[in-house]
Image: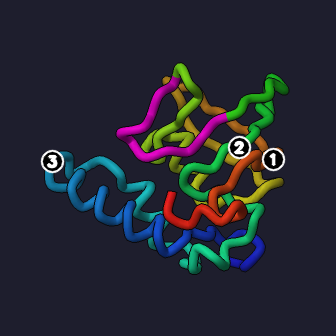
């Protein structure tokens, strides 16, 4: 994987998500595989060193739908904070899984309700690490 395409995951996010995935795997062994693979292939960086254009946990991002041109803001959250009505997307959802570690300007592709979807990451409105919130 080239550095231009590399996923970045903070060490804090990696530790937290690994713990969540271990608990989930005991109850639902077939869930979380895509997220586990993404983290395994990611470049793990200290929270203080993550570039500000990378989607981390609790980041609020603007997505531009490739097909419809619709603009949407979502916050990438842990499963217990997910709330679709408030645009809080679980990192375990198909969209959440492809957002983690991606950079502004990247296209993400996922399947939602049986339909293939694609969007560009247009902007990061809020990234905790860029604001000094290293443990959000």
Badge 3, how many Cα within 10 Å: few under 14, some, many 20+?
A: few
Quadrant in which residue 81 is drawn: top left
Front disc: 3 or 2: 2
For the record, the magenta segment spans 74-84
> For mark 3, what is the residue?
27
- In this orientation, which residue lies closer to the viewer: 94 or 104? 104
- Distance, label 2 to label 1, CA atoms, is 6 Å
Residue positioned 51% across, 49% down in the render:
97
> For mark 1, what is the residue?
123
In the image, residue 104 lies at what x, y percent? 79, 55
- In this orientation, which residue lies closer to the viewer: 109 or 7? 7
Residue 11 on the magenta segment = no
Could you tell me which secondary element the residue under label 3 belongs to? helix
Residue positioned 45% across, 72% down in the render:
40
- Distance, label 1 to label 3, CA atoms, is 36 Å
In the image, residue 41 lies at what x, y percent? 51, 73
Quadrant in which residue 2 is drawn: bottom right
Could you tell me which secondary element the residue under label 2 belongs to? strand
In the image, residue 60 lies at what x, y percent? 67, 44
Front disc: 1 or 3: 1
Sequence-first tag of 2 and 1: 2
* CB under 8 Å between discs 2 and 1: yes
């Amino acid at each position: 994987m080239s550095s231009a395409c590399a996923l970045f995951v903070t060490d804090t996010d990696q530790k937290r998500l690994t713990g969540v995935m271990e608990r989930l795997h005991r109850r639902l062994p077939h869930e979380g595989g895509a997220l586990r693979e993404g983290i395994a292939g990611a470049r793990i960086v200290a929270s203080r060193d993550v570039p500000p254009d990378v989607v981390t946990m609790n980041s609020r991002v603007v997505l531009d739908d490739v097909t419809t041109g619709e603009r949407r803001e979502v916050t990438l959250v842990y499963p217990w904070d997910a709330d679709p009505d408030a645009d809080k997307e679980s990192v375990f959802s198909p969209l959440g899984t492809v957002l983690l570690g991606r950079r502004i300007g990247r296209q993400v592709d996922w399947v939602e309700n049986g339909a293939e979807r694609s969007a560009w990451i247009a902007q990061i409105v809020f990234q905790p690490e860029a604001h000094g919130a290293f443990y959000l």
